[in-house]
Image (cartoon, rainbow, N blue to C red):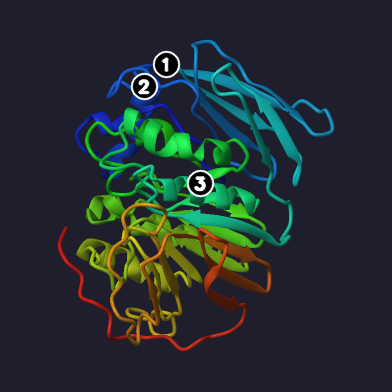
Amino acid sequence: MGAGHPPALARGCRRRVSGTRWRGVLAALAATVGLGGCDGRFPPGWAYVSGVSSTAATVVWTGADGERASCRAAGGATPGGSATPRGRGLQVVRLEGLAPSTRYVCRLGAAAGTVRFRTAPAGDEPFTFAAVGDTGDGSREAAALARRILAGRPAFLVHLGDMAYPSSRAPTLDARFFRPYRRVLARVPFFPTPGNHDLVRRSAYRDLFAPIAAGEAPSGPHYAFEWGAAHLVSVSSPEVSDAAGADPEWLAGDLARAAARPWRLVFLHEPPFTAGTKSTERGLRRHLEPVIEAGHVDLLLAGHSHLYERAEPACAVVPGASVLEIVSGGGGANLDPAPAPRPNFPRVLAVTHYLRVHVTPEAIDVRAVDLSGHVLDHARRRRGESPACRAEGWPAPRDR
């Protein structure tokens, strides 16, 4: 259940691979340097930090071949790490032996500049993270929202998928994600989950973000990490419709191993339940929802529908479950029309926004925040509570 860091692979260039073949594909592709072959050499100047734990982190950037990172702690200590050039100008450094709750600075190549990050705490200290989804068209609203997120100084940023429209090919990612989010990524650890537009043919997403972690599912790019009192899991929802790619056993095992943690959070792109215009995919509902409920997930964050939507706690499959689901797909792309609220979805808003999630050992507070900083909605889960849940009245799913 360690934090993930990206490997060198270009699965988006090839036909879809799933199931038990995933490990073999990883091993074969990680040995190559043909990274970024879908769109040629990566544009210089991309940089982000991921795989951050209390003792380690992964720094990724694009620039000239042979560039190296120079990293140090605020107090002057230099962490150990090994640089791995991935070809096509992509550089990856895994830093080990870091100190908890410590700020580090890494000077990268000329184009990528400098990144800063703070490691996770060693214990269950309170923290606040940001979550945003469907940022993908590089609009003024998306750029303004990125500035608002940075001003909130989150511990890390979760992206709920669809970074760039119509696809996450390298030129589109450059213009519609990395440019508006460059300052955020230079200061805030980044944990993405793929959307349906991120995994289309010739996408650069897997080259850049597909995480490998201790505890990663063998069938796909699902991963988990710890921060404070929370155990967080990223699930690749575009692949869950395929029974071979869903890997419910891995997710069930991961959640079982995290049973002693105060909180269990899952984030993905396509939601199990939504009242929006983009109805839930049938395979995702069938493969994922039973595992989510049986694993006693406290909070599920999703995107896909371009709006804000808070559902009532769900127990559609497992009696006594109580999963609070929030859809946050208003990251700057064109908004979907908001349906009228109904009993299972008491709060639905078509507005550009992001989520601020504050986590303590005793409670989780989720606030939807608009471009002006106004709080649109607030939901709270207290540890030990068993709020009423809804078993019926959920919209019917569809086939992909």
Q: Is residue 166 above or below residue 81?
A: below
Mark 2–mark 1 Cα distance, whole angstroms, equals 6 Å
Task: Determine which quarter of the picture holds residue 374.
Answer: bottom right
Mark 1 or mark 3: name the one nearer the start of the chain.
1
Q: Is residue 309 left or right of residue 255?
A: left
Q: Residue furthest left?
A: 399
| Residue 314, percent from left and from top | 39, 79
Amino acid carrying label 3: it is Phe
Mark 3 sits on what residue?
A: 191
Task: Determine which quarter of the picture holds residue 54.
Answer: top right
Q: Residue at x 29, y 43 (%)?
A: 165
| Disc number for residue 351 | none
Instruction: Label 3, secondary structure: give it.
Output: strand
Mark 2–mark 3 Cα distance, whole angstroms, equals 21 Å
Mark 3, residues whose alpha carbon is within 10 Å: few (<14), some, or many (≥20)? many
Amino acid carrying label 2: it is Leu
Q: Residue at x 28, y 69 (%)?
A: 276
Mark 2 or mark 1: name the one nearer the start of the chain.
2
Mark 1 sits on what residue?
A: 87
